[in-house]
Amino acid sequence: MATFIISGSRGTDDPTMATLPFMAAKTAKEQGHDVVLWLWNEAVTLGRKGAADHVIGVNLTPLKELLAAIQASGVAIWVCGACAVARQIGGGDLVAGASIKGMPDYIKAVAERDRNVMF
């Protein structure tokens, strides 16, 4: 089993790119790997309750379904704190399984993980 941190930076402005880190996190978890999903930049908006409901990338599984699968499997969803503040997103706005984290948390996780996949 490998350990992954999968990072997404795109939000509702680019549904296809926004969906890819969720697909990767789901797939890695299904393969038995330990996974953290890191949302930063515009992707932090996807951590807000209801934001994923209408995001569908080109020829991809709807984000709402991927998010539900990730939550059910226990993948940790980390939302960049500085990025969230800039978009007026607080801890109470987040989907289940998501938490606000800082850059020190992210860098520590990258250093400790086997793989870092970025979208």
Image (spheres, helix red, strand yellow):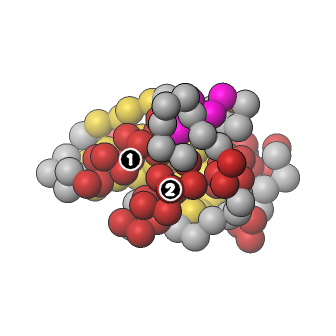
- From which residue to which does the magenta span run? 14-19
63 sits to left or right of 107: right
Q: In terms of secondary structure, where does tag 2 sit?
A: helix
In the rendered image, the vertical position of residue 106 relative to residue 94, given as above or below: above
Residue positioned 49% across, 31% down in the render: 59
Q: Nearer the viewer, mark 1 or mark 2?
A: 2
| Camera sees residue 14 | yes
Quadrant position of residue 113: top left
Instruction: Residue at the far front: name it.
Output: 59
Whether residue 10 is in magenta: the answer is: no
In this rendered view, identify the residue nearer to me: 77 or 85: 77
Q: Count the numbered circles shown.
A: 2
Residue 27, given in percent of the width and then of the height, sits at: 31, 46
Residue at 37 percent of width and 40 percent of height = 24
48 left or right of 30 in image = right
Mark 2: which amino acid? Glu
> From mark 1 to mark 2, how far is it between C-alphas?
13 Å
User: Could you say where residue 39 lies in the image, as x and y percent from the top left?
Assistant: 58, 44
Residue at image mark 1: 25
Precedes in sequence: disc 1 or disc 2: 1
Q: Residue 65: give its label.
A: 2
Q: The residue under label 1 is which amino acid type?
A: Ala
Place of residue 10 in the rendered image (x, y in percent of width and height, measured from the top left): 63, 32
Residue 51: % across, % down: 71, 53
Which residue lies at the image location 75% right of the left edge and 65% below the top edge?
93
Tell me which residue sits at (52%, 67%) in the image: 97
Give SS at disc 1.
helix
Q: Does residue 67 lie above or below 43 as drawn?
A: below
Q: Is residue 106 visible?
A: no
| SS assignment for the magenta stretch, majority | helix
